[in-house]
Image: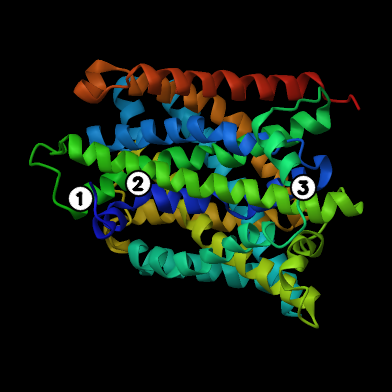
Amino acid sequence: MISLKKFFKILGPGVVTGAADDDPSGIATYSQTGAQFGYGQLWTALFMLPFQAAVQEACARIGAVTGKGIAAVVKEHFSKKILYGLVILVLVANTINIGADIGAMAAAANLIIPINFVFLTFFFTALVLTLEIFTSYKVYANILKWLCLSLFAYPVTVFIIHAPWGTLLKSTLIPHFEFSFQFLFIITGVLGTTISPYMFFWQASEEVEEEKADNLIGWDKKPRIGRFFIRNLRIDNFMGMLFSEVGTWAIIVVAATVLNAHGITNIATSADAAKALEPLVQTFPNAGFLAKLLFATGIIGLGLLAVPVLAGSASYALSEALSWKEGLSLKLKQAHGFYGVITIATLIGLLINFIGIDPIKALVYAAVINGVVAVPLIFIIALTAKNKKIMGDYKSGLLSNTLVWLTFIGMGTAAIAMFLTFGRN
């Protein structure tokens, strides 16, 4: 039996990854599906949990067992075409996601601070880069975890609104489908913002960072781990994914009950999304402002956590592919290329905010792109995690292997169906 103290000590990369999963793109996409389809896609939160946990556990296990990130493993065991194809997909998807998250933070801040949107995007970009490059990520993440507590505003709101619990139970347990482009577009976004490419690379690389910090990497650069390490890794991973899906479920419920039920079926701005939290503060005279403040705090806190994860995972992928020195444990002067990729990806993401796409729409588009990009990545992860030559005694078992392949099939089917229904009502 694990004591409470030991349990919290186990929590690490998995929980950070799970928290970053409910980034601004996630909040926007889950809010949009709740507003547009009511409880129609609520079942995804429950049904995605085992698949999300299986894929992330496979990624974490690959990193822990090999002592290398995903890109480094692919470089060693697959062709260069596959390696560079995967790296390009991750760089493109992550950069778009970074831009959408920066824009969302600026738009959310603008709800409570009447400062120019352009200035706010530059401010958040500079803040993220300064903290990520010059601050230990562990210190940075520990600070931001407190801001991420604002995500609990959604679960709390679920118990304040007059939600139809019988309907919620039915919608959570019984899948509902509509063969229309709008439905499949959003469900691809829900899948993509939940089972996201950046999470694959990030968690694998952070497991390696943990091993380095605990001096578990031997002179031959191979990890010295045992079954207790893998057990703890799985506990950490599952708790992170569970936390992520509870947040997903609550956001959809709140948006469906507060917005959809009152005729708001399209979230066009941050102010629209913030209305979902008004019941939480309706006992106060200025409920609208307090709801905006809560929403802004959540978006900014989770955005400040997610943008470094996005930039960091992109940098891990490219640095490993090109054999550069990499790792957030290194100083700037020790890893110019690694931190250079972080900087460039973040700055390009910043520029995306000036091509005329609304920040909320950009978040949903980023989620859909992730949903498409994740498909080939999961294919490679499935092949790698079950490979005896790569994973040794820790190769995927029947349950893990089955869940990962089912995730590949499910997300691939959703993406193909979305493209097939393009142009249809």
Q: In which quarter of the image is the C terminus?
A: top right
Relative image position of residue 81 (x, y in whole percent): 45, 21
Does any portion of residue 97 appear in the rendered image? no
**Left or right: 103 as drawn, with respect to 130:** right
Q: Disc 2 versus disc 3: distance between alpha carbons?
A: 33 Å
- The relative height of residue 19 versus residue 51 in the rendered view (above or below) is below
Image point (30%, 37%), residue name: 63
**Is 423 situated left or right of 256 in this image?**
right
Q: What element does badge 2 sit on?
A: helix
Q: Would residue 422 appear left or right of 411 to someone viewing this image?
A: right
- Label whose residue precedes the other's in the sequence (2 or 3): 3
Q: Mark 2 points at which residue?
A: 236
Front one among 394 and 367: 394
CB of mark 1 within 8 Å of CB of mark 3? no
Amino acid identity at mark 2 = Asp
Which of the marked residues, 2 or 1, is nearer the chain's N terminus?
A: 1
Q: Between disc 1 and disc 3, whose residue precedes?
A: 3
Question: Is label 1 or label 3 in front?
Answer: 3
Q: Nearer the viewer, residue 85 or 8?
A: 8
Residue picked out by circle 1: 212
Q: Quadrant for residue 381, please give it.
A: top left
Residue 201 point in image, percent of width and height: 42, 40
Return the residue found at the far left: 219
Amino acid type assigned to the residue bearing label 1 in the image: Lys
Q: Residue furthest front?
A: 166
Q: What residue type is labelled 3?
A: Pro
Instruction: Identify the disc placed on residue 164.
Output: 3
Local SS, label 1: helix
Q: Mark 3 Cα within 10 Å, few/some/many (few <14, many 20+)?
A: few
The answer to whether the residues at label 2 and label 3 have Cβ atoms under 8 Å apart is no
